[in-house]
Amino acid sequence: MPEQHWIADLGDGRYRNPVLFADWSDPDVIRVGADYYLVASSFNRVPGLPVLHSTDLVNWRILTHALDRLVPEEHYATPRPGCGVWAPSIRYHDGLFHICFPDPDHGISVTTARDPAGPWRAPTLVLPGRGLIDRCPLWTDDGAAYLVHAWARSRCGFNNRLTVRRMTPDLSRPLDEEGTVLVDGDAIPGCRTLEGPKWYHRDGWYWIFAPAGGVANGWQYALRSRQVWGPYEARVVLAQNATDVNGPHQGAWVDTPDGEEWFVHFQDRGAYGRVVHLQPVRHRAEGWPVIGTDDGTGRGTPVATHTKPGAAGKKSVPHAPACADRFANGRPGPQWTWPANPRPGWIARAEEPGTLRLSCRPAAAPDLRTVPNVLGQRLPGPRARITTGVRLRADDPGAHAGVVVLGHAYAWAGLERTPDGVRLVHRVHEGRAGDPVPHPGPAPESAPGVDLPADAHVRLAVTITDGAVVRFAADVDGTGWRELGEPFTAAPGGWVGATLGLFATASPGSPHAAGVADFDPFDVHPA
């Protein structure tokens, strides 16, 4: 059955926001020819650095991931929520695609490719250090290269400033020993938490688009100067105003082949993650851009619907990044990631076509927030019903397998191996940000479990409705659906939205491979 989830293209020459109703955080977008490429933060997800492709800025597909693994390898052998790849930037220069990305604990790295579909070169750490985030390169007409970045107070003790470094043209190393403060947010009235800079040179102006005020309740600045080193004057060009688009944040200024201008940015939607919006861009007489609609002062307001970009957009077939998966060749599709660097054997050879077989690996603790082998993806929009099936083939008591909605709090439904057989269980852990991990014990059952035959096949359903309210249901061997427990409100994780995941684990001290779990095709339906 084809998947059905949030589609932004309305099919009549218009689109609705968000154009990506899923956690594609901190987007940056470029156009090369008639094609658009988007990169996003991936934090501790592996593979990392997703690259998406579009021909109209509305309909997107996952093209590849630029990072196979996170480094340092052993550091990311266990889940480290909130760490890893923060806001990247993508640029095309001298025949190469460049992605610059920060790890707030290690520094700024660069990877390149001739083809955005890959292969991408192993990343080079070009600016080591803690607290360096949100970077963007710029090449000037005289061949000089620069890199601007922001700062993470959590790592270095300060923020609200943008720093620039001169770089070699290939971005492989800096040419100055110390960076120079390019923009001091403290000198801009009302500015706080200036971050996420994107740098451009257009029509004789150097432009920096940068959000401030924080992810949840901030606004978007444009800053401009006639000189690359400034000084830069600032103006608020996009704010929430009377809309429900809180804190319109960090994005990209991009044009179409026929000269239209657009701005792509994100909005924090809690458990849904940082969803992506598309705004038209117009210019006032003073030359400042107005993003969205003008509120009468030049400060833009986000649009809910709009005519699609350019002539190419009129011909597009509506689609969105994949969520459903038929598990071709027994492998997951590109929408799936792990919360840590994967190890060989986490996915085993499936015996039946269209089946994903996960190995039951020993878990150091019963808290799924600490388990590295949870295969996850983003929530597929505001409303959806997801179905799959599971059969647990494990003799070791303490083995578990099922489907989970995972964040600071989490809930899962599936099968549990006991000394007496297999049980259908539903467990909920009402955690919150800052809770200690690992949790001292397993999440409590929300209702008494159901004893089943050892070879039972159980269909599982996860229904997501407005407000990220989640309901679990099960169908045992075709006997009909029954709801499991009470509704659960999904919670975000470390700088990410909730994860919709599949897992198979064994108890601590179990053999290296303590059985397997077979999952049926992963279907997405309207809810």
Image: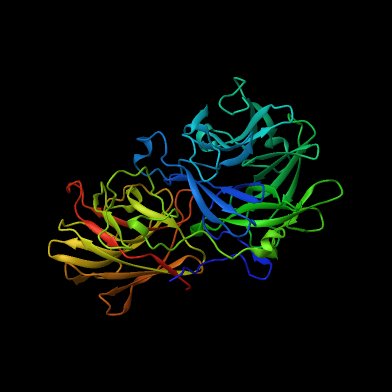
Q: Residue furthest right?
A: 285
Residue closer to the observer: 42 or 439: 42
All told, the count of numbered labels is 0
The color scheme shown is: rainbow
Measuring from the top left, give residue 457's x and y in whole percent: 24, 69
Compared to 457, does 130 lie above or below?
A: above
Compared to 517, does 129 lie above or below?
A: above
Residue closer to the observer: 72 or 472: 72
Q: Is residue 214 visible?
A: no
Measuring from the top left, give residue 84's x and y in whole percent: 46, 40
Compared to 253, does 19 lie above or below?
A: below
| On-image quarter of the N terminus | bottom left
Q: Is residue 398 visible?
A: yes
Compared to 181, does 41 lie above or below?
A: below
- Residue 499 sits in quarter: bottom left
- In the displayed structure image, the side of residue 178 where residue 398 appears, left or right: left
Q: Residue at x 32, y 49 (%)?
A: 371
Measuring from the top left, give residue 138's x and y in whole percent: 67, 34
- Residue 489 sits in quarter: bottom left
- In the displayed structure image, the side of residue 312 where residue 282 appears, left or right: right
Measuring from the top left, give residue 127's x and y in whole percent: 54, 28
Q: Residue furthest bottom?
A: 479
Residue closer to the observer: 262 or 265: 262
